[in-house]
Image (spheres, grey):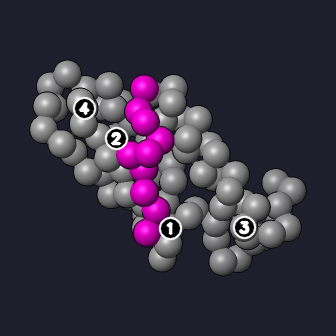
Amino acid sequence: MWWKARVMLFAAHPDDEVIGAGGQFGNIQDLWIVHATDGAPANMADAGKYGFSRREDYARARRSELIAALKLSGIDPARAFELGF
């Protein structure tokens, strides 16, 4: 681990943190993640293609994906916050 200081990673929505810095997660000792949104779009056209008819259900699925990815990375899901913009 070469990042011993606390690191706060700010991303627009879930999965952006993985795209931007996921390869470094194992090198960060004290990682905290903040998302501006829940990842569910206002326009549900794309989400509808994956079987989601309600925005809330899609947002819940995105959160579940995030938690699963964090657990695989050895990061406590309690270290990921969403601001709700």
Residue ID at (85%, 67%): 53
Q: Nearer the viewer, mark 1 or mark 2?
A: 1
Q: Nearer the viewer, mark 3 or mark 2?
A: 3
Residue ID at (33%, 57%): 10
Residue 61 image point, x, y percent: 70, 52
Residue 2 image point, x, y percent: 15, 25
State left or right for residue 5 relative to residue 39. left
Which residue is label 3 attached to? 56
Please indicate, yes or no, whether residue 19 appears anywhere in the rendered image: no
Specify the label residue 37 is tagged with.
Answer: 1
Chain part drawn in magenta: 74-83
**Farthest front residue in view:** 78
Crowdedness near tag 2: few (<14), some (14–19) or many (≥20) residues, C-alpha within 10 Å? few
> Along the polypeptide, which appears first: circle 4 or circle 1?
4
Specify the label residue 28 is tagged with.
Answer: 4
Tag 3's secondary structure? Answer: helix
Distance of mark 4 from mark 1, alpha carbons?
Answer: 23 Å
Hey, what amino acid is under mark 3? Glu
Distance of mark 3 from mark 2, alpha carbons?
Answer: 27 Å
Residue ID at (55%, 44%): 66
Q: Nearer the viewer, mark 2 or mark 4?
A: 4
> Along the polypeptide, which appears first: circle 2 or circle 4?
2
Distance of mark 3 from mark 1, alpha carbons?
Answer: 12 Å
> Along the polypeptide, which appears first: circle 1 or circle 2?
2
Crowdedness near tag 4: few (<14), some (14–19) or many (≥20) residues, C-alpha within 10 Å? some
Residue ID at (68%, 56%): 60
Tag 4's secondary structure? Answer: strand
**Badge 4 vs badge 1, beta-carbon distance below 8 Å:** no
> Along the polypeptide, which appears first: circle 3 or circle 1?
1
Distance of mark 4 from mark 3, alpha carbons?
Answer: 32 Å
**Badge 3 vs badge 2, beta-carbon distance below 8 Å:** no
